[in-house]
Image: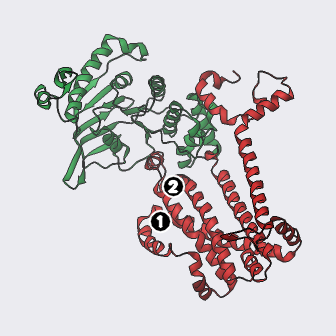
Chain colours: A green, B red
Amino acid sequence: MSEIKVVAPKGHIEVKNFSLSYDSIEGPVEAVTDTQIHVKPGEFVSIVGPSGCGKSTLLNAVAGFLKPTTGIVTVDGEPVNGPSAERGMVFQQYSLFPWKTVRENVEFGLKMRGMSRSQRERAARTLLGLAGLEAFEKHYPERLSGGMKQRVGIVRALATGPKVLLLDEPFGALDAQTRVIMQQILTNMWQRLKISVLFVTHDIDEAIFLSDRVYCMTARPGSIKAEIPIPLERPRQQSMMMSSEFLALRRGLMSLIREESLKAMGGEITDLGMQGLNIELHGHSLADVL
Amino acid sequence: MSSPAILRHPEDTMQTAMPDAPPAPSATPQSAPASFGTLALRWYRLNQGSLRATAIGIASLIAFLIVWHLLTTYRVVFFVRFTNVPSPLAVYASFTKAIHDPKFLMHILLSCRRILMGFSLAALVGVPLGLIMGRFKLIHEIIFPVAEVLRPIPAIAWVPMAIMLWPTNEQSIVYITFLGSFFPILVNTLHGMSLVDPVLVRAAQCLGARERSIFREVYFPASLPHIFTGLTVGMGVAWVSLIAAEMISGQYGIGYFTWEAYSLVQYADIALGMIAIGVLGLGSSLLIRGAGQIVMPWRAK
């Protein structure tokens, strides 16, 4: 435990007047437009939105992989220009180094910092112990299950003691049961480390269950449609997902997202349009069936 | 239920423990006093697949020898003429004679030395060059066109030029061996570099890695499987080029030995030379495969 410093609440993310566009043959295409978000030190904030709305683009800009076209991203007042170990990132595809064992993966950030072999070995063992992975420290990632890989991914990102943790649909590739367990593990780690988290997901339940606040984005070009505080008590239990409070939040977010998803898909399916299609299904028209 | 890990993640442990467990029946703990018979039976069941392959392989080699023997003893002429082809027994006789002949051993040693020099040079130049070309666009843009023009020229076509370029015969032969293995190594290294997952590079950057560390910790190990493919292919082409060069311009070497046997009408030695070349080629590619397994333990099955 001694190696893990208890970080003073730092990690204030601010994204101001943010827009990002890229060039194409038909001229510039706006991916994200006029967006402001912030994450207070120690806060857990999620971004949800229809697919292709630019939520990952926004996260990648905070990580420093993309430069904003206009606006600025700052962490604790310092502008972000380029990736750094201050902002740990967890990827959907796990992205563990296949040629490194579990422990070497966790050690990587510390090695880059120039920590001695014995020191970082001890630090990595402690962290793996906290994640219940000590028995697998010598395994190569290929031999782990998806949930274990992502646990290693999270531990690796936390090993350098970053100010903020950025997660890009980290549990998107996991099955439902593993997902729930991983959400619990992430919450526990977050509460222990008091780190700011920016979490991108398309799963509304996940966003509500984990977050203090949820940003809902519009269809492309993405911007913030709504900001929803989640006043649910902590520590949160799985059973809370059945509470009326949770369901009310869920309904609200659902309708916001549904509206945007339909926009993203090219508009609502109208009765008139259906009739125009004139498709017959077992004697009923498609419009009736839908 | 021997370790806490099993209690916690039953499926994970199952999955991961399997490759660890030796195929020996002692790995099954429940029946300690198993008799020799049951142990042998279990071992047989576990290794049935590889036993079968080995048995068929041996039978097929024996069949090959028998067919060869029959074709040569009866001097079959059926489009192909086996009249002058040596029989396996004649080749075996010349083999037993050759292994006591220091000249034959010197031929082999010299060929091995040429391969070692030409191939090592190709690896020492080709791998770093491929890595650098894969990382720096300008260097790629400068070198790639030249490489593409030179690559399709077979190493054998370089023989006259090599004789002009290098002062000694030995150097020109090593040069041709080098050329033969150089391009497969370069091209495969480049290919490996182009396939490096950009997300891994990002992950490294997020953990504070700078350009040099990313090169060493991500690009290089990620390309290793393709580098080893290049080395294996390169070793094969190195032997092809070496034997051709030795037949044309050599004074020693196993290729020269084979050609000389033809000129001196020692037909058994022709086959002996060919078999020696085959065994040496097989041995060197096994060496590379072994080195690959040592260097890339994460790919071991």
Using the rendered image, report if marks 1 and 2 lie on a common chain. Answer: yes
Q: Which residue in the protein does label 1 denote?
A: B133
In the picture provided, is B121 more to the left or to the right than B96?
left
Count of number-bearing discs: 2
- Please provide percent x and percent y for residue B259: 73, 79
Look at the numbered disc 2 and give the secondary structure of its residue: helix
Q: Where is residue B92 in the image (x, y as percent from the top left)?
A: 84, 66
Residue B9 seen:
no
Chain at numbered mark 2: B
Say which quarter of the image contains residue B93. Answer: bottom right
Residue B280 position, x and y percent, is 73, 65
| Label 1 SS | helix
Relative side of B227 to A180, left or right: right
Q: Which of B191 and A288 is in front in this view?
A: A288
Residue at point 66%, 55% (across, down): B289
Q: Residues within 10 Å of mark 2 (few under 14, many from 20)?
A: many
Judge left or right: residue B165 versus residue B257.
left
- Identify which amino acid the numbered label 2 is placed on: Tyr
- Quadrant holding the C terminus of chain B: top right
> Which image quarter: residue A275?
top left
From the viewer's perspective, is residue B216 above or below residue A117?
below
Residue under circle 2? B219
Q: Is residue B35 above or below residue B263?
A: above
Q: Which chain carries label 1?
A: B
Residue furthest top in the image: A244
Disc on the earlier residue, 1 or 2: 1
Check disc 1 and give the amino acid type.
Met
Q: How far apart are marks 1 and 2 (CA)?
A: 12 Å
